[in-house]
Structures are given as C-alpha cells and as structure tokens.
Image (spheres, rainbow, N blue to C red):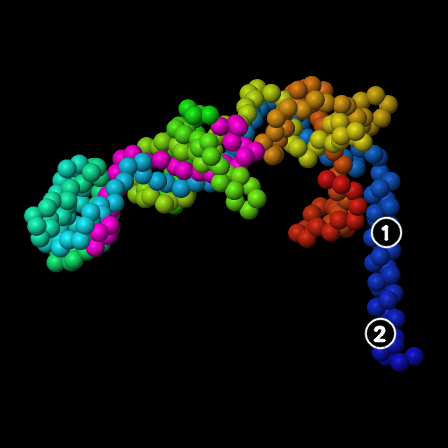
Amino acid sequence: MGVRRKSKLIKWVMTGLVVAGVAGAATYYLMQPVASAYKSVKALTGDIITFYSFSGNVLSKNRQTIVSNKTMLITQVHVNAGDLVEEGDIIFTTETGEKLAAGIGGEVVNIYVEEGTMVLSAAKLADIIDFSKLEINFRVDEYDVGVLETGNEATVKIGALNKEVKGVINSISKEGQIINGVTFFTASIDIEPLDGIRTGMSAEVKILSEKAFGVVVLPMNVIQFDERNNPFVLKSGGKKPVEKIKITTGINDGSVVEVKNGVLDGEDIFYKRSIALEDILFPEGGKNTRVYIGGQN
C-alpha cells in the first residue's frame, strides 16, 4: 500500500471516529431526563413603555430672506454674517438712499452681496434666522398619522449634539405627499433652543404609544404559539416535567412582553434549549463558536 493511500485511509478512519464520538455524545445527551433539554427564566414584575419613532429635521419657525424689490446698487452693508439684529434694524442702504431693514429679530446667517454690487429685482441679499423659536418637522406615513394629535408630548433627540429635549406637537398637515407609492403627512414639534443647535440637523422623534406599570413580564423568546396562533408557555407541574399553559399577553417593547394571566410573578418558565457541539464536547465551556445540531431557542 502506497504512503499516500495509507495516509488517506488514516484520515478517513480518524474522521469516522470523531463523527462516531459526536454521535454517541449527542445520543447520550438526548437520552438524559427531559428537564435537561430546557432552560428556565423567572417571570418578573416590571414596566413596559413603547413609543412611535419618526425621523425629522430642525427648522426655525421664523426666518427671513431679504430680497431686492427692483434693480438697485447696494452702497452700504451694515451687518456681518453672525450678527444679531432686531426687527427694524437697517441691513442695507442703496444708491438712492433706500433702507432695507430686518423684518424679524434673529441672527444674520448669510449675506449674498457686497458694497458696490448692482443687483436685479428679486435677488437674494441676506438670510436672517430666529434661533430662539425652533421646531422639528417630521414625516408620518398614512398608517401612523391617526395616532398623532396636536398637544401630544414628544421626546426629541438631536443626534449631532447627543442631547434630548421635550416638545409638543403644534401642527399636523391635512394634505399628504405621495412618495414611492406611500402617502406621508408633515407634523411639527415646538422645542426649546439648545447650545450648538443648527437648522437642518437631523432629529429622532419619540412619541408615547402604550405603557403598562407593575405588570408580569417575560422575555419574548419564551412565548410559544400553538397551531391556532394562541400563546402559551411551559411550566413544570403535574405528571409531566413541563406542561403547556395558555396565557393572555398585552403590550411588548420588542424584548419583553406583558403577561396578563397564566403566569405569576416569580414563577419559573421553561423553554427548549439549543444543543450545541460545545455543550456536548466541552460541557465546562471553552469554545466561542457555536455550531447548532438541533433543538430550538
């Protein structure tokens, strides 16, 4: 027998032994008492709060773009970008002595012309923004707009500043816009000014959906459903190691669910554990990679 053929045979024999060993260990594991095939969690009393979440942007409720009302020569610019002005302050003077004033109080954020510039009618000259009166505009699709009402409180997070502020919905549009086949409506929230905030910054809006305080809660992954989609859990008792108990669920936040009846605070709830090679070959741990060969979470 050649060396290469002999080496190949040895590899096949070793592979066979490993497979046989794993199969034997798995068989032994599966023949253990039923309870060893389950893990358990305790039902606890807790609170659940859920929110609707929307994306929006920071806007100013008051802003003015000063434009020319005719062809004119700008002879004087009385402000610089960044200056704070009051309503009525003179911003520009023309060759004819005409004064162009601020219509609102705020900060001069853009100046589009220099002294000695001839501009045509309707040309943009400067922008003034009142940063003391800000709002968040956000889009709501047609399926969620019905849950919003003016006066609803909201939490707004400005991601760029990593800050949260409270606000109140001040308006909800009645006319929608169709985008990619879905109708969206625009809503606005009044917010207080923040240090460093700028118009255009993105914001996450959270509005309270449901809440339940002092209720029995369980992780969602231990809730199971029968063929009629009725929820149940597994509890120990009777002649069986575990038995199915029908439950009534309430709200959930994506991680835990409210259990209205069928489970009491402190009860152990069982769920099927996953059987992994590391559990069989390394019962004391020692492997990071989990390779599942059966069972369910």
Q: Residue at x 15, y 42 (%)?
A: 101
Badge 2 element: helix
Picture residue at 20% right of the left edge, 38% below the top: 103
Q: Position of residue 111 (x, y in %)?
A: 21, 51
Q: Nearer the viewer, residue 213 or 18?
A: 213
Going by the image, does 79 lie left or right of 251? left
Q: Tell me which residue sits at (75%, 27%) in the image.
A: 230
- Residue hosting label 2: 7
Residue 18 occupies quadrant: bottom right
Outermost residue, bottom direction? Answer: 2
Q: Is residue 199 left or right of residue 139?
A: left
Q: Is residue 157 above or below residue 236?
A: below
Q: Nearer the viewer, residue 98 or 183?
A: 98
> Outermost residue, right direction?
1
C-alpha distance separating marks 2 and 1: 24 Å
- Which of the image's four quarters has the N terminus? bottom right
Q: Which corner quadrant of the image does residue 226 belong to? A: top right
Residue 257 in the image: x percent, y percent? Answer: 63, 28
Q: Which mark is residue 23?
A: 1
Residue at the image position 39 percent from the left and 37 percent from the top: 136
Which amino acid, by three-letter code, is at mark 1?
Ala
The residue under label 2 is which amino acid type?
A: Ser
Specify the segment rendered in magenta. Answer: 120-148
Q: Position of residue 54 (x, y in %)?
A: 49, 37
